[in-house]
Image (spheres, grey):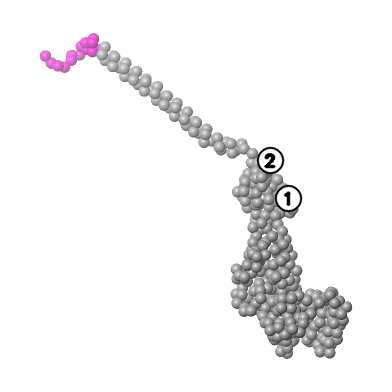
Amino acid sequence: MSDVELPGLQPPPGRVRRSQRAQEKRRKKRKRRSLVAVLVSLVILALAGTAVWFGAKPIIASLTAPSDFPGPGTGSVMVKIPDGASGRTIGRILAEKKVVKSAKAFVDAANKDPRAQKIRPGTYELRLQMTSSGAIALLADPKNRQVKTFTVAEGKRVAEIVDIIAKTGIPKKDLQAALKDPAALGIPEWATSKKGLKFPAEGFLFPKTYEVEPGDTAVSVLTAMVTETLDELTAAGVPAGQEWKVLTEASILQAEGGRSSDYPKMARVLDNRTKKGWKFQLDSTTSYAVQRFGVTTTKKERDTKSAYNTYYVKGYPVGPICNPGADAIEAALAPAKGTWLYWVTVNPETGETKFATTDAEAQKNIAEFQKWLRDHPQGT
């Protein structure tokens, strides 16, 4: 009999039941798999939602948080605003120091506050976590700048200037140490190479008012003064190679002259005496040689063998005898026209100076000066 089932014949009942049970098992397994898949999907979605929430939370917080600190601030912090700093630069500096919350907050406040235009370079004592407007108020008030000032008058010597600067709190010993390395202060080689100078920085400490901020040192302050002198030489148009002569001559005019209007005449006298081969014979240079102050000198001092003593050397002294100002520098560059060979400051109190071409005229002026000395015995 053939193994092929004939059409119309059905499987035995037991086989049917076994097949139905297998199908039911398969349905239940698929149902369980679907349920697990749904549960896994729900867990994944929950985890993803949590991650999104925690990831977005800082962003949401930053979007909803105030853009500026709310209060007047606490504590204190020193902040230095550099020269030429823009509003954005100032804001960045303040934000880094945690004075304001952000550079943007400061810039936004500065754009609305006209006081921001008054902010000057310098060092300020501010508070931590201030409002931007509060920071602007402190920065715009010059009283809050942490600065000391000193003023150097025209004609002061290096030794005098050291004492003046030391009053700001910079140690005198630091200033004296810094002066021993003139090249480190920016003094050019054409000056530092000179031999026999009492103070290589003499002539280079430009007279004016300076500011000293926290953190400034003897070197930084003296360097600023040297820079001022070099800038003045450039502004005056001093020819290259003539800087030393101009500084030295200007220092003589500054030390000898009582009135700046006389400087050009004095410069002409020095030129005329140089052309004749005469010594200058100036008490100011002799006083510097012996490191003394006064309007007269003694014969012993005038006989001093010093490269600064113009009773001893012919022509200019070895270097500047004080620190000249702009008027003296300009006069050294542009002497007045004239034939004068002598000058005498007949009244040191008023600075009145008389000029002469002949020795006889000069003697009359000397006699007038001597009378002043007799009338003012304490003036020498």
Occupied quadrant, residue 151? bottom right
Where is residue 355 drawn, in percent x and y? 82, 83
Task: Give left or right: position of 134 versus 342.
Answer: left
- Is 25 covered by the magenta stretch? no
The answer to whether 224 is drawn above or below residue 140 in the figure is below
| Residue 237, visible in the rendered structure | no
Where is residue 114 drawn, in percent x and y? 73, 50
Residue pointed to by mark 2: 71
Q: Marks 1 and 2: which is nearer the front?
A: 2
The answer to whether 140 is drawn above or below residue 34 in the figure is below
| Residue stretch in magenta | 1-16
Secondary structure found at label 2: loop
- Residue type at the position of mark 1: Arg
Residue ID at (52%, 36%): 55
Q: Residue furthest front?
A: 300
Task: Give left or right: position of 337 versus 83.
Answer: right
Residue ID at (71%, 49%): 138
The circle on residue 333 is none
Occupied quadrant, residue 178? bottom right
| Residue 179, visible in the rendered structure | yes
The overriding secondary structure of the stretch rendered in magenta is loop
Residue pointed to by mark 1: 115
Quarter of the rendering occupied by the C terminus = bottom right
Q: Residue furthest top?
A: 13
